[in-house]
Structure formats: structure tokens, C-alpha cells
Image: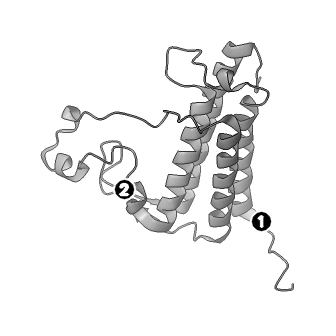
């Protein structure tokens, strides 16, 4: 093999990358052929739209795979960052915390074209990490009420978690799309 010939990804790494690509593809397919207005249409009682799901999946995947490289600091400045979870954990006052969930809020510049490109950009970085990372390498999870105290997650565990997130949100998007214009991605 020459220095310019890329090494082929096989085995578990290839399976993780392929599974993520497949389910990410289902999500992206739900946005095909939509107008900007349709992509931002709330068709259920939730605040979810196809566009907001694309944003959330890209942001979440990016953050989790940054975690595989950086550890818990990848969550600094993210979800609930204005809350000192360590202090709250010390006196077990999780239920008293108020914070605004902005993970699904879209900016004007976050068009379908932008969001689809962002999903693809994040996917490329994920694949790069999965091709080279020690799948058993792990970091402690940050302190937050939704994480098991003292738990660590490996790169493999993060990939499985992100796969579940993408799959779940692809299903949400499919339901939204069917309500918007009758099209179905799955089933």
C-alpha cells in the first residue's frame, strides 16, 4: 500500500459508520423535496420540525463525538451550560432547576441547504473519529441529572447512543413529514 492509498475501514468500525450513515440517511430523506416553510412546520403538538430535528441531530452528534476526543469539556457551553450541575448535585436539588431548552430553536440562516450540509459535515468528522479512535477508550460523563453518577462511556458506547438518537429522530421526522404532505420515508 502506498502512502496515498487510504486504508479501507472494515469490521466493527465499518459497521458503526455504515449504521450511522444509513439512519442519518433516513433522517435526511425526510427533508427531500420540502420547502423552507414545510421544513419548519410543526405538525404535531410538540415544537419539533424536520428542520429543527436536522439541527438537533447535527449538534448532538458533533458534541458526543467531541466528547470521545475531549471528554466532558465537550459539554461546556452546551445543553444547560448556564447551570452549575456540580453544585446542584451536591445538595440533590435537580427538581428545582429551571433552564430554557433551545436545542430545537432555528436561526434564520439555518436553511434546509445549510442544515443538510451541516449533518453531512458532522457525519464526515464522526467517520474520521470512528476510523481511528480506540473504541474502548472512555471518558467520565459530565455531572448532570440525566447521566448515571460516576459513569464513563467508551467511543463504542457513544456511537451506539448517537445511532439510537439519530434513529429516534428519523422516526419523529417521518411522522412530521407524513402530516405535512403525506410523504413517508419509512414503511
53 in relation to 70, above or below: above
Q: Is residue 103 left or right of residue 135?
A: left
Residue 101: assigned label: none
Gap in angstroms between the C-alphas marked 2 and 1:
33 Å
Q: Secondary structure at mark 2?
A: loop
Residue 175 lies, in percent from the top left, at 65, 20
Of tags 2 and 1, which is closer to the observer? 2
The residue lying at 50 percent from left, 67 percent from top is 69
Quarter of the image with the C terminus in it: top right
Mark 1 sits on what residue?
10
The residue lying at 68 percent from left, 27 percent from top is 36
Residue 168 lies, in percent from the top left, at 59, 33
Q: Is residue 120 left or right of residue 154?
A: right
46 in relation to 168, above or below: above
Q: Dot 1: within a 10 Å radius of its alpha carbon, few (fewer than 14), some, or many (20 or more) residues? A: few
The residue lying at 30 percent from left, 43 percent from top is 145
Q: Is residue 66 left or right of residue 71?
A: right
Residue 76: assigned label: 2
Asked if one can make out residue 64 in the rendered structure from this viewpoint, the answer is yes
106 in relation to 46, above or below: below
Residue 61 lies, in percent from the top left, at 56, 50
The residue lying at 59 percent from left, 39 percent from top is 109
Asked if one can make out residue 168 in the rendered structure from this viewpoint, the answer is no
Q: Quadrant of residue 131?
A: bottom right
Q: How is the image coloured?
A: one colour
Amino acid at each position: 500500500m502506498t502512502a496515498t492509498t487510504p486504508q479501507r475501514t472494515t469490521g466493527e468500525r465499518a459497521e458503526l459508520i455504515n449504521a450511522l450513515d444509513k439512519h442519518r440517511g433516513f433522517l435526511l430523506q425526510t427533508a427531500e423535496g420540502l420547502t423552507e416553510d414545510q421544513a419548519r412546520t410543526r405538525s404535531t403538538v410538540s415544537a419539533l420540525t424536520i428542520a429543527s430535528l436536522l439541527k438537533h441531530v447535527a449538534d448532538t452528534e458533533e458534541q458526543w463525538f467531541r466528547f470521545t476526543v475531549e471528554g466532558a469539556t465537550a459539554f461546556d457551553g452546551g445543553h444547560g451550560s448556564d447551570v452549575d450541575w456540580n453544585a446542584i448535585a451536591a445538595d440533590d436539588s435537580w427538581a428545582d432547576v429551571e433552564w430554557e431548552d433551545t436545542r430545537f430553536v432555528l436561526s434564520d440562516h439555518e436553511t434546509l441547504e445549510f442544515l443538510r450540509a451541516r449533518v453531512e459535515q458532522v457525519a464526515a468528522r464522526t467517520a474520521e473519529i470512528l476510523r481511528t479512535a480506540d473504541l474502548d477508550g472512555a471518558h467520565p460523563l459530565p455531572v448532570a441529572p440525566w447521566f448515571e453518577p460516576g459513569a464513563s462511556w467508551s467511543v463504542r458506547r457513544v456511537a451506539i447512543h448517537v445511532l439510537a438518537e439519530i434513529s429516534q429522530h428519523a422516526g419523529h421526522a417521518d411522522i412530521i413529514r407524513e402530516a405535512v404532505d403525506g410523504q413517508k420515508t419509512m414503511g
